[in-house]
Amino acid sequence: MKNKNDAQLFEIGKLVVELSMIGGTDSNLDALLERMISVLEKLPQLRLQHRGAIYMYSPRNSPVRVAQYGLKLNLLQEDEDDPLHGYQTPFCKECISIRHTSPAGCHNLLILPLQNGLTNLGQVVLFADPKWTPIRSEFDFMTDLSRALSDIINRFLLGEVLRMREVELEESRADAIRRLGTASEYRDSDTGMHIMRMTAISVVIGKALGLSLEERELLSITAPMHDVGKIGVADAIMLKPDRLTPSEFNIMKSHTEIGGSILLGSDTLVVTAREIALYHHENWDGSGYPTGLSGEQIPVLARVCAIADVFDALVTARPYKEAWTLQQAIDWIKGQSGLKFDPAVVAAFDNALPEILRIRELYRDDVIDPHQVLHLPEIPCREVRWISWDENLNVGIASIDEHHRYLFDLTNDLINVVANRLGARELGRVLKGLGEYAVIHFSAEEKMMEHLGYEGLALQQVMHRHFLERLHEFKREIHENPLVAQHEILIFLKKWLVGHIRDEDSKLSVLV
């Protein structure tokens, strides 16, 4: 019997080495856990069940489930049917066996410690046969296994941290591009909201056109650069409150070439930004400027930006003109199909109109009117909605309710990234977008409260500031341990959004 057990232990040792080699190839801890449980099936005397979980400790020393196998997905850790509901087992340096009781029943668990040197990383939790009590040698073996798993998970963690560092470097480059585009705002009568709206509209048109996620991400970074050349146009023309004369307009047109001369380089971001700055005033029929390009000679992202820029300009009041109605602007855009604009992009614009009109409402220049009734087209529900909007959360101010629904959408996007293991790049992109929109939303709410003399403004400002500070902390933590931080973010967002809307924003109904 001893020789048989030795042979099994030797065989499992080889499999653990194989598991260790495989473990560093990706960042899917669910798959690692599944492979580990499959490996342990080679030792039937361990009497383990086909389910388990990996917990890692947060900076606040609370266990956060970062992987699972054979269990229902429970990202927000609030399902009472979860057999590990309420799991809180103190760290132990050796494998132990415990009984865990939850609303779903009583379970026999093996707890394997995870460490990085003297640092306690977390625990692997394996479900075992209720009638099985491991003997000393089995505990010793599982403790040895936990050391091998600790090495593997440390490699996983290092890989994710390195990926986040790469994303951070790319974001720094992208932010430099965006800031250069923002600089042009200070030479124009537009507010910063025009660039935000124009960029968001470009992205949804690009999505309707069938552009890839990578192309849309590139568009979101470079679209703000479309008017960077205005930096080189004289104030007398840029800030003139009346219509420009023909000679002044000719000078204004030079902003495209100035932008092209500013944006020189071989970097993909710079090349794309240069194409947009140079060619977003070219026309499909060749009648545009500065070079008279036509048709598909015009880069596709410039063709997309052209419609987004013109549409937002038409429906926005300027010192020298009244805003067009939405229908007037839509009809004019469609009428320019095949002349000024690419027919395919016009069709994409038409298909994206529900989202475009929502963007106009979310990124508005004026103060929110609590009595305004919105008439927005219904946006199709997303295929997966992890947290659903509850109509009981309506505060009775249509624009604020729309802002809140959009925050729920962004939170669902973030949960989707984590649930489907879409990686550090997508996590960073969605989290950044959520943070940027939260700033816009809070600003819009506070402007309305201040305008109407709302008594709770100071408290709301404190709460908004706390939310943004907490989000900033998560961004820092995600660079140290993305496996844990991404799950904690989800729990915080769900709790904060619902609680803040229910307990504080509901009081805004007094303004109606």
Image (cartoon, helix red, strand yellow):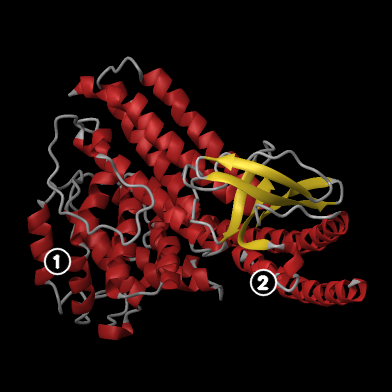
Disc on res. 333: 1
> As displayed, is residue 283 above or below residue 330?
below
* Res. 378 visible in picture: yes
> Crowding at label 2, few (<14), some or many (≥20) Cα neighbours within 10 Å?
few
> As displayed, is residue 213 above or below residue 370?
below
The residue positioned 67% from the left and 36% from the top of the image is 60
In the figure, is residue 248 to the left or right of 50?
left
User: How far across and how far down the image is residue 261, in percent?
Assistant: 47, 69
The residue positioned 52% from the left and 73% from the top of the image is 268
Spatial CA distance of label 1 from label 2 is: 59 Å
Q: Secondary structure at mark 2?
A: helix
Q: Quadrant of the C terminus?
A: top left
Disc on res. 38: 2
Check disc 1 and give the amino acid type: Ile
The residue positioned 40% from the left and 68% from the top of the image is 216
User: How far across and how far down the image is residue 166, in percent?
Assistant: 64, 63
Check disc 2 and give the amino acid type: Ser
Q: Earlier in the sequence, mark 1 or mark 2?
A: 2
In the figure, is residue 204 to the left or right of 410?
left
Please tell me which residue lies in front, 414 or 385.
385
